[in-house]
Amino acid sequence: MTDALAEIRLPSEEIRDDLPFFTKTLGMRLDMIYPADNPEIIVVSGHGVRLRIEKGAKEPPGTLRLRVDDPDAFAEGKRELTAPNGTKIEITEMNPPLVLPETQHAFVVRSSPTRRPGSSDGRACITATSFPTASAARSSRAISVSPMAGRCPTWCITTPSASS
């Protein structure tokens, strides 16, 4: 397979304004600049990305999201920046804390959809958003739990009828 290198192209109105922002403020490395006497294209790389900034490019400015170990020590602690070419820079933590929503578990008993009309075989179905608690296992009546085909996580509980 042939080697390949991807670049993200961003527009610029004035290269001399964008160059110090991307190299000094964001700490990126200047890889190319041309033509040398009146630059119209710069290529910078760093933070796992390679940017090609072209004077007069037709694309709108984009958003570059940088994930860093210590956002407070990067770019003077600013979390949002705008480059001279209009590119938005978002600075976030490398590994933000995982926020889990609070859950509410439920144990619902309802009539079995497979129950025969007029039968008293004690069938019921539960829909569990959490596993049944140990108190269900301590019930004085024997129960058997089996998954209903194609209806996971709905389970049928069959208890002996009152006559058994």
Image (cartoon, rainbow, N blue to C red):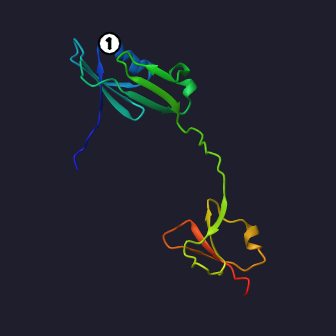
Horizontally, residue 33 falls left or right of residue 73, namely left
Eyeballing the image, is 137 above or below 54?
A: below
At which x and y percent is residue 68?
51, 32
Horizontally, residue 103 falls left or right of residue 86, namely right
Eyeballing the image, is 137 above or below 31?
A: below
At which x and y percent is residue 45?
36, 29
At which x and y percent is residue 119?
62, 81
Horizontally, residue 62 falls left or right of residue 135, namely left
Q: Nearer the viewer, residue 20 or 10?
A: 10
In the picture of the structure, the residue carrying the numbered disc 1 is 16
- Write the residue at 37% across / 15% down: 84
Judge the density around disc 1: few (<14), some (14-19), many (≥20) Cα neighbours within 10 Å: some
Q: As drawn, which residue projects farthest toward the front?
A: 118
Task: Tell me where residue 39 sits by quadrant.
Answer: top left
- Write the residue at 69% across / 78% down: 143
Horizontally, residue 94 falls left or right of residue 106, namely left
Eyeballing the image, is 120 above or below 83?
A: below
Pick the quarter of the image with the C terminus: bottom right
- The tally of labels here is 1
Q: As drawn, which residue projects farthest toward the bottom?
A: 164
Q: Nearer the viewer, residue 15 or 85?
A: 85
Eyeballing the image, is 66 above or below 134?
A: above
At which x and y percent is residue 32?
28, 24
Q: Amino acid at mark 1?
A: Arg
Task: Tell me where residue 20 sits by quadrant.
Answer: top left
- Write the residue at 64% across / 50% down: 103
Task: Tell me where residue 13 sits by quadrant.
Answer: top left
The local secondary structure at tag 1 comes to helix
